[in-house]
Image (tube, coloured by chain):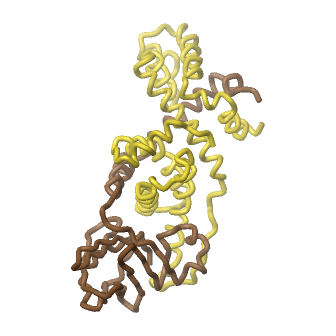
Amino acid sequence: MSTMGADLSDDELLAALKRAVAERNAVPPDFIEAAQAAFAWHNIDAELAQLTYDSLQDTESASATRAEAASIRALTFTSARLTIELEVAHDALVGQIVPAQPAAITVVPRTGAEVTVEADDIGCFSIEPIPLGQFRLRCQTAADVEALTGWITL
Amino acid sequence: MRDDPSVIALVTRVCGGDHEAWNEIIDRYAPLVWAICNRYQLSRQDIDDAAQGVWVMLVEHISQLREPAALPGWIATTARNECLRMLRTASRYDLSGQPTEDLMPPDPDDRAVDEDLLEAELNISLRAAFAEFAELAPDCHKLLTMLITDPPPTYAEVSGALGMPVGSIGPTRSRCLSRLRRSPHLAAFLSGHAGAVQARKTGR
């Protein structure tokens, strides 16, 4: 096969350079800044709770390739020491942590403010209203176990 | 996909907690993600959300990438999936806010991922080679910077701006492009990768 060097004329090379530079210049600065800021999620301390059950997984082949950001009605996240079960009720996201124990459950959205609710003695909690957009749950138990779910879209 | 050693080095550094290396990955691949997201008719906010999905997943899973050299492909595929997720989420609710049947919208983007990747890697290499010119060959950097502005300037305008006789612009342009072609950043493309992009573009 002949090489690009031989194939690409001066005009073609200049046009390619123009496209390459234009492609970079078209990206808004705040798009770059937001991407750089995502580094904050590197090496978080909490145990990651993986999605282990998703009631809609079978019906959404596309999201099945995505381990953690499925669209669901009932789902289960499991970390080394905790299981978090969730169900979408009429107007609330209800859940229970197993083993049953009190805990602080925090909704961590992609953007916007976090909201924390308490799980009671048997680990039950209710989040109202149902979070919009993508979020994850951070669970901090009284015994100081911290788990973080994958991203959830309801 | 070629095994770009610089990609592997960047991934390794990010795994070790190097924020600068992360920023370099963003600098290289944000244009690819931006270009992909803009092919789906998404609002700017949905584009931002899709892109954030890509970067958060990447930073969380980067240490589990089996082949760091496959990073560009991972980014392109994940960007498409995230855009489709945004479309799917948008189509799930009708105007009254009620859930509709959970149908997967067709992918409006019929470009092959391979095609995106070839072009992205050529563009990344061209930008890297060109950025080096700022120090290695400042006269070439100035001239080429002018020549790629839109709309293209006349030789008279170039001559006025750079204090270069009109008659020497053509030969200098040719010398600078030859030098760009010889840049080590473009070495990987000299053996056919960009030739494939070029062939596709020109239908050869």
Q: Position of residue B148 (x, y in %)?
A: 51, 28
Instruction: Please name the residue shown 60% across and 78% down the image.
Output: B103
Instruction: Please name the residue shown 55% across and 44% down the image.
Output: B69
Q: Is residue B147 above or below residue B39?
A: above
Q: Colour of chain B?
A: yellow
Q: Is residue A41 above or below residue B174?
A: below
Viewport quadrant of the C terminus of chain B = top right
Q: Position of residue A122 (x, y in %)?
A: 29, 91
Quarter of the image holding residue A134? bottom left
Viewport quadrant of the N terminus of chain B = top right
Q: Nearer the viewer, residue A120 or B105?
A: A120
Q: Nearer the viewer, residue B189 or B99?
A: B189
In this image, B126 relative to A121: left or right? Answer: right
From this viewpoint, is residue B47 visible?
no
Q: Position of residue A1 (x, y in %)?
A: 77, 30
Q: Colour of chain A?
A: brown
Q: Is residue B152 above or below residue A154?
A: above
Q: Is residue A102 above or below residue B55?
A: below
Q: Nearer the viewer, residue A92 or B139?
A: A92
In this image, A138 relative to A86: left or right? Answer: left
Instruction: Please name the residue shown 42% across and 69% down the image.
Output: A151
From this viewpoint, is residue B148 visible?
yes
Instruction: Please name the residue shown 23% across and 78% down the image.
Output: A143
